[in-house]
Image (cartoon, rainbow, N blue to C red):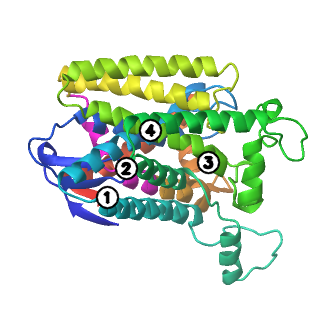
Amino acid sequence: MSTAAAPRMTSTRYDATTSTVGAISPARERLLSLDVFRGITVAGMLLVNNPGTWSAIFPPLEHAEWNGWTPTDLIFPFFLFIVGITTHLSMSARRARGDEDRALVKQILRRGIIIYLLGFAMAMFPFYQWGTIQSLPNPTAWEKIIYRIEHVRLLGVLPRIAIVYICAALVTLKTTLKQQIIIIATLLFGYWFAMTLIPVPGEHEIGALFLHTHDRNLAAYLDRLILGTNHTWIGSVTFDPEGPLSTIPAIATAMLGVIAGRWIALKEKPLLERISGLFAAGSIGMVIGLMWNWSFPINKNLWTSSYVMFTAGMACVTLATVMWIVDYSSVKGWTKPFVVFGVNPIVAFVGSGVMARLIYTLWHVAYKGKSIAVQDAIYQSVFLPWLPPRVASLAFAISFVLLWYGILSVLYRRKIILKV
């Protein structure tokens, strides 16, 4: 991982899978909307991940409790979808420059491994167990480090992005469009059948009867079997929303993005025709997802097949809207803040994640005679005295986003883009 000076935007290529920047030939079409779409997704992620308090949040800024969806549940699949789009565009550009498949495979694996290691490092931070350990009353520094390793989450958002990126890129490297559609259908139908028809071990009933439960479905069973309860999401322990089985349909999300990228890259077709095609495909995808929801509910934690189709459809329609506004109608005055977020997504994700861990968990200050987290102290002292709780919580989140806009703006002005 390194930083490097990037040329001006009129002559650069941004790779959403890794935020890598490289020179391109002037003949290549430049769609600003891809950076804007990615930037909207990244800004939305920061907004929903960093409220003033988790006890006072407007419903659209929370994940659905289980089945169903909110705008917050669109953020992660949107990012995987844009990863798929830019994976196709990046590989096509490298092939055009004469790169062989062997070099592409090496690059895919290198990038994916680095992204996973970044996610693992975030999960390990601060690299030793913070606070008390019930089983160790007076732990040494070494025991705190070992305990952290023994309880670190192995999967998560960045690890899922890494795994999905590697799988989707390798699968689509040498397959045709028809083969890719067959693979996507196999992944989605196979996951549907597995989750609903296979009896869940220990439950003696088919999985369809346990889709409404958090920890008794097949995906949760495999989370515990493969990861163990020490390495799952700390918010649940008994299942992991980015667990092994539910990562399989997430690969289909990125592959649908690859197909969208193939369509977007057809420069022989007029831009308006490509935009219309995205609108049409997205509408069909949303309808399929909503109909599939009747038998396999839309569910982010399980990443159900209906969720894949619905969110990919929403991503198509959203991207088409942005393309129509930005690239076709040339209404670009509002785009710069999102471009700033969009060209450095890894910096935004890792940096904001580390900052959030510090101010929400690790860094405490004295406030009104109590030791509380810095985030809570800021929320209570700056926002809560003059705003209702939900509005104050949202104001804190917006301030967090603006802070990171300022940080990323400095990097943008200095033409510093994180390379992976």
Which residue matches tag 3? 242
Identify residue type, mark 4: Gln
In the rendered image, residue 181 lying in the magenta stretch gets the answer no
Where residue 180 is drawn, which disc sits there?
Answer: 4
Q: Distance of mark 1 from mark 2, alpha carbons?
A: 8 Å
SS for callout 4: helix
On the image, the x and y values in percent for residue 294 come to: 68, 18
Q: Distance of mark 3 from mark 2, alpha carbons?
A: 25 Å
Vertical order, 338 against 127 (above or below) = above
The magenta-colored residue range is 333-351
Identify residue type, mark 2: Leu
On the image, the x and y values in percent for residue 45 come to: 47, 40
Q: Distance of mark 2 from mark 4, alpha carbons?
A: 10 Å
Q: Is residue 209 visible?
A: yes
In the rendered image, residue 337 lying in the magenta stretch gets the answer yes
Q: Nearer the viewer, mark 4 or mark 3?
A: 4
Identify residue type, mark 1: Asp
Q: Quadrant of the C terminus?
A: bottom left
Identify residue type, mark 3: Glu
Q: Could you tell me if the residues under marks 4 and 1 are in contact, i.e. CB atoms within 8 Å? A: no
Q: Could you tell me if the residues under marks 1 and 2 are in contact, i.e. CB atoms within 8 Å? A: yes
